[in-house]
């Protein structure tokens, strides 16, 4: 099964042209507000640097971002059953911050390492970038890939996680030559995901 999360992220967030996709047309995406958090620290708490703490109860994660994102949700039918993609996007003056995950049909079986690699490869292909570096790692006990890709004008740093049956991807895209290491580290290090 082709992996769709990276292509959806790029289509929505960066308005790059994407080559023909290998699946049926997607339905229109309907934005909906992210569910409020009932666990501390609550959403909309802004820290001393001006970043907001965001928690997605449905997504089982929390993160610091420049502002609270909205959840864009899409369910697509496929030959392996329906899958639902969730996407959160925030843009500031220089960077684009993205978090997404996919819930596959429970009957669909996949190889976890192949899933990580396919998400990375499709992301790089989708933005017509060059893969600069990649490394397998374990983050907070979860298998992950960390990679960097470049286009002619942007640098993308990303992590792809497998948590249970969910692939998660976090991305920060910055103009080339204006990479903000402090923001990258803050965004990546604040991302905490847990099993549902």
Image (tube, rainbow, N blue to C red):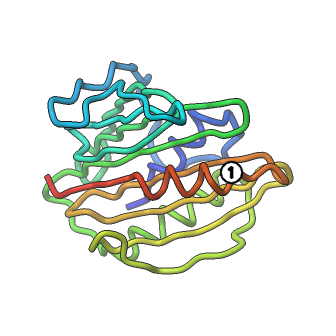
Report the side of 146 relative to 160 (left or right).
Answer: right
Asked whether residue 22 appears in the rendered view, the answer is no
Residue most toward the front? 48
Residue 126 placement (x, y as % from top left): 63, 52
Q: How many marks?
A: 1
Q: Residue at x 36, y 71 (%)?
A: 139
Q: Residue at x 33, y 19 (%)?
A: 33
Residue at mark 1: 127
Q: Quadrant of the N terminus?
A: bottom left
Q: Is residue 141 above or below residue 52?
A: below
Report the side of 58 relative to 99 (left or right).
Answer: left
Residue 51 placement (x, y as % from top left): 49, 34
Asked whether residue 34 appears in the rendered view, the answer is yes
Q: Residue at x 29, y 40 (%)?
A: 84
Q: Is residue 103 above or below residue 121?
A: above
**Residue sitting nearer the eye, 49 or 26:** 49
Q: Residue at x 53, y 65 (%)?
A: 120
Q: Residues within 10 Å of mark 1 (few under 14, many from 20)?
A: many
Residue 17 placement (x, y as % from top left): 71, 40
């Amino acid at each position: 099964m082709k992996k769709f999360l990276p292509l959806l992220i790029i289509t929505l967030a960066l308005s790059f042209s994407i080559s023909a996709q290998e699946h049926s047309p997607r339905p229109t995406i309907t934005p909906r507000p992210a569910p409020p958090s009932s666990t501390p620290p609550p959403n909309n708490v802004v820290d001393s640097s001006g970043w907001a703490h965001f928690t997605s109860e449905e997504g089982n994660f929390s993160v610091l971002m420049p502002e609270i994102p909205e959840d864009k949700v899409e369910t697509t039918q496929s030959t392996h059953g329906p899958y639902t993609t969730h996407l959160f996007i925030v843009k500031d003056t220089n960077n684009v911050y993205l978090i997404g995950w996919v819930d596959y049909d429970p009957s669909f079986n996949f190889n976890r390492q192949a899933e990580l690699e396919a998400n990375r490869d499709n992301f790089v292909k989708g933005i017509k970038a060059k893969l600069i570096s990649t490394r397998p790692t374990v983050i907070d006990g979860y298998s992950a890939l960390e990679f960097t890709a470049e286009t002619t004008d942007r640098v993308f740093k990303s992590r792809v996680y497998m948590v249970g049956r969910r692939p998660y991807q976090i991305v920060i895209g910055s103009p080339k030559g204006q990479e903000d290491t402090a923001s990258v580290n803050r965004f990546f290090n604040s991302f905490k995901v847990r099993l549902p």
